[in-house]
């Protein structure tokens, strides 16, 4: 099923499964601050999380015909120590399962991943949400200290 293009009915069922899971997370998971869905006809969700190292951040889930793509904005491009900063993130990628740090618009740093649509279930959604949360919390401050070192030494 991962390589197959899903039918509109299959996509509707997956969308409903994700909607149900997110509704439960909003009620039961204290880290989840808000859940919003994209425009009409878009199979996209915005999950706002409360962090400690990074006060708040949003994970975007986008359901396509073959995959569920997820991403979160981690931080802007570094202003100093560029080589050390990118080496730090590339080495962190070795520890990640199902996601990787990437450079996005305006050279900002994102954490991105995707899974085959056939692998979507509550357990996998829990793993994704928990993993992305943990990785942002774990790697945000050290990356900031490298890319914005002078702001931390003042």
Image: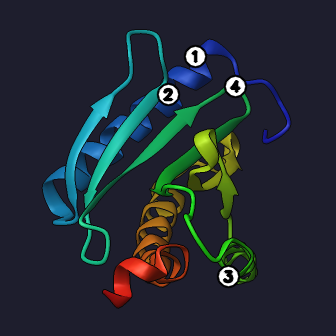
Mark 1 or mark 4, which has the lower sequence index?
Answer: 1
Looking at the rendered structure, the secondary structure element under dot 1 is helix
Q: Are marks 1 and 2 in contact (CB under 8 Å)?
A: yes
Rendered-image quadrant of the C terminus: bottom left
User: Residue 28: where, in percent of width, then height?
Assistant: 17, 61
Looking at the rendered structure, the secondary structure element under dot 4 is loop
**Cα–Cα gap, marks 2 and 3:** 40 Å
Rendered-image quadrant of the N terminus: top right
Residue behind mark 2: 13
Number of the label disc, if any, that sits on residue 88: 3
Q: Nearer the viewer, mark 3 or mark 1?
A: 3
Q: How many callouts does the rendering have?
A: 4
User: What residue is shown at x 36% (from left), y 84% (from top)?
Assistant: 152
33 relative to 13 in the view: left or right? left
How many C-alpha atoms fall within 10 Å of the one at disc 3: few (<14), some, or many (≥20)? some
**Cα–Cα gap, marks 1 and 2:** 6 Å
Q: Which of marks 1 and 4 is in front?
A: 4
The residue positioned farthest toward the right in the image shown:
3
Number of the label disc, if any, that sits on residue 65: 4
Residue behind mark 1: 9
């Amino acid at each position: 099923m991962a390589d197959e293009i899903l039918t509109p009915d299959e996509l509707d069922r997956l969308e409903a499964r994700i909607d149900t899971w997110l509704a439960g997370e909003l009620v039961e998971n204290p880290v989840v601050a808000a859940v919003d869905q994209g425009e009409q006809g878009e199979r996209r969700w915005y999950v706002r999380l409360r962090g400690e190292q990074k006060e708040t951040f949003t994970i975007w889930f986008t359901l396509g015909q073959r995959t569920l793509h997820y991403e979160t904005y981690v931080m802007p491009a570094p202003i100093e120590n560029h080589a050390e900063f990118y080496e730090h993130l590339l080495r962190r990628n070795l520890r990640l399962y199902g996601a990787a740090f990437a450079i996005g618009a305006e050279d900002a740093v994102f954490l991105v991943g995707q899974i085959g649509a056939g692998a979507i279930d509550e357990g996998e959604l829990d793993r994704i949400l928990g993993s992305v949360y943990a990785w942002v919390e774990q790697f945000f401050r050290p990356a900031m200290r490298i890319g914005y070192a002078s702001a931390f030494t003042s």
